[in-house]
Image (cartoon, rainbow, N blue to C red):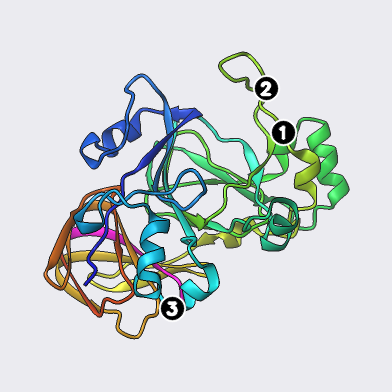
Amino acid sequence: MLYPIKFIPRLKERLWGGHQLLATVKAGKGAKIDPEKCYGESWELSAVPGDESVVANGMLKKNNIEEIIEVYMGSLVGEKNYERFGLTFPLLIKSLDCHDVLSVQVHPDDELAAERHNSYGKTEMWYVSGCEPGAALYVGFKDTSITREEYLSAVNEDRLPEILNRVEVKVGDVFFIPAGTVHALGKGIEVLEIQQTSDVTYRIYDWNRVDDKGNPRELHTALAVDAIDFASDGEQCHMKYEAKENTSVNMVDCPYFTTNIISLNGDKEFDYASLDSFVLYICTAGEADVTMGEHTEHIEPYELVMIPAEADVVKLNGNATLLEVYIK
């Protein structure tokens, strides 16, 4: 019988990164850490080629995500997911520390990404797990009737931020970013990011900054323009929900993933017998024990555990805020 599976985080140095991930992603989790580097991302679960996550616990320890899917197939990820995605785990889960503002960017949808990159597109969501007072992000355009020509004019005249929808954030805010939506995370924000397994990004504005060698980073203006959904409404990307104690409350529901929030207080059982999918629990605050059969794993903030699809009942114990993620 399978068990709750944990993975070794993969830290990524970024120009806009800081040192917060050094505190949240502990060396005890097996991540390779250099205290001198500025890390912007911790990939908690990945099937991106070359960056496949490796199991951290139990009998499957040291095997990567593709290897365990190859052996356990639908028992691990769900029969429908295995038929649809094969050996590729369909989601990429990241923790981000935005010590500086990120570039303004957009991701292609499945059709365009397949045509150009032989890849999946990227629809994603953000859960704000920490932020400084007044921190803000950008999502969509202020005017949803903006034309392609007006957008290109703003890009060419170096005034793109003026036409973007800016939103101040607080801990617990959730944003759903469909492929084609222009977006940027702002300075002083920490997020948990759930997305399709894809690393295709078109950078369209980078705040006129340079890298550590004094060079501006590459922009993808020509590629991006055909990927942008100019009618994307940034206000509708800000998802509304009301958390309830010991209840799974939906935040985002789309063809690529479903994400709920659980405000755990004490003991709670969840029955997944009728769900043909893996389940991910991602801890955003507090601590919890996750039990499947005779196996229990403890999770703390920014830790993730995978519940195999073969599980029926999962028992949770603790005081924590958990994201619950699966594919319908």
User: What residue is disc 1 on?
Assistant: 219
Give the residue drawn at x 31%, y 69%.
308
User: What residue is disc 2 on?
Assistant: 216
Q: Is the magenta stretch mostly helix, strand or loop?
A: strand
Q: Position of residue 173 (x, y in %)?
A: 43, 54
Which-is-in-front pick, marks 3 and 2? 3
Circles 3 and 2: CB atoms closer than 8 Å: no
Report how far apart the C-alphas of labels 1 and 2 lie in the structure: 9 Å
Q: Which quadrant of the view contains residue 178?
A: bottom right
User: What residue is disc 3 on?
Assistant: 79
Q: Earlier in the sequence, mark 3 or mark 1?
A: 3
Q: Which quadrant of the view contains residue 2?
A: bottom left
Q: Does the magenta stretch include residue 327?
A: yes
Q: Is residue 143 magenta?
A: no
Which-is-in-front pick, marks 3 and 1? 3
Q: Which amino acid does label 1 sit on?
A: Leu
Residue 85 lies, with reference to residue 65, above or below; the image says below
Q: Which quadrant of the view contains residue 65?
A: bottom left
> Can the viewer see residue 107?
yes
At numbered mark 1, what does the secondary structure look like: helix, strand or loop?
Answer: loop
Q: Where is residue 33 in the image (x, y as percent from the top left)?
A: 32, 29
Report how far apart the C-alphas of labels 3 and 2 lie in the structure: 46 Å
Q: Which amino acid does label 2 sit on?
A: Pro
Give the residue drawn at x 43%, y 47%.
94
257 lies left or right of 230 = left
